[in-house]
Amino acid sequence: MVPPPAPSVYRTKAYRVRQRSFVALAGLGLLATGYGLGRWQDSPVPAAAVPPVVVTSAPSAAPSAAPPTTEAPAPTVYPKLEAEAADGNVGIQSQETTDEGGGQNVGWIAGGDQLRFDNVDFGPVPATKLDVRVSSDAEGGRMEIRLDGADQPPIGTLNVTRTGGWQNWRTDQVDITPTAGKHTVFLTFARDDGGEFLNINWLRFVH
């Protein structure tokens, strides 16, 4: 009969078997852990949610208002004022004329005589001159242009000179103070000796 092993020997062998089993299990555990870590590292990391970028177009600039266009007023085309058709006269008579166009002129003009033209519209662009169709066989005397009264200061003066005969016609031009708007025009006549010195066919203002 074989005697049983000493208890210390049995315990030693069993201890070694358990120890080896633990080591094996620990190895398997480490292997499984390593495998799991590898799978975790290989798994794609979800990207952080990025808020969508909203692109807004810059507001288009409002069209700038075009500056108002200011057109210059058109100059008035002045009509020819026939002397015999004046709205009023003092000391003046009409007669047949031999000037171009025919018709009548006013004559026998002497110092103190007058012609008046009502409601002459000069428009927004001032007139600066006056054309006068005249004839004279005398030297000296003057015609003065006045506005809105025969006693108002003259805006222009024509010094009369001989044209070569009472029916020899010439167009003289007088500079006047620039005049706009509507006015009554007076022509007044002066001569130192009071004699007759002028005939007039027509007059016309110009710019």
Image: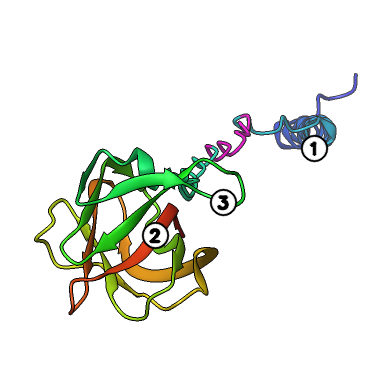
Amino acid type shown at disc 3: Thr
Residues drawn in magenta: 52-62
Numbered tag placed on residue 98 in the rendering: 3
Most distant residue in the top direction: 1
Relative to 91, is 23 on the left or the right?
right
Instruction: Give the class, few, some or many, for how many residues have Cα within 10 Å of label 1's Cα (few <14, many ≥20).
Output: few
Marks 1 and 2, Cα distance to the nearest angstrom?
124 Å
Residue annotated with mark 2: 199
Q: Residue at x 38, y 71 (%)?
A: 175
Number of disc labels: 3
Q: Which of the two labelled residues, at mark 1 and mark 2, occupies the earlier sequence position?
A: 1
Q: Amino acid at mark 2?
A: Asn
8 vs 158, nearest the viewer:
158
Q: Amino acid at mark 1?
A: Gln
Question: Tags 1 and 2 in contact by the CB under 8 Å rule?
Answer: no
Report whether 28 appears left or right of 55.
Answer: right
124 within the magenta span = no
Badge 3 element: loop
Residue 25 found in image quarter: top right
When asked about the image quadrant of residue 192, the answer is bottom left
Q: Residue at x 28, y 47 (%)?
A: 181
Mark nearer the N terminus (3 vs 2): 3
Establish if 61 lies above or below 97.
above
x, y (%) of residue 194?
Answer: 18, 72
Residue 49 higher or lower than 128, as above or below: above
Where residue 189 appears, x then y in whole percent? 23, 65
Q: Which residue is mark 1?
A: 41
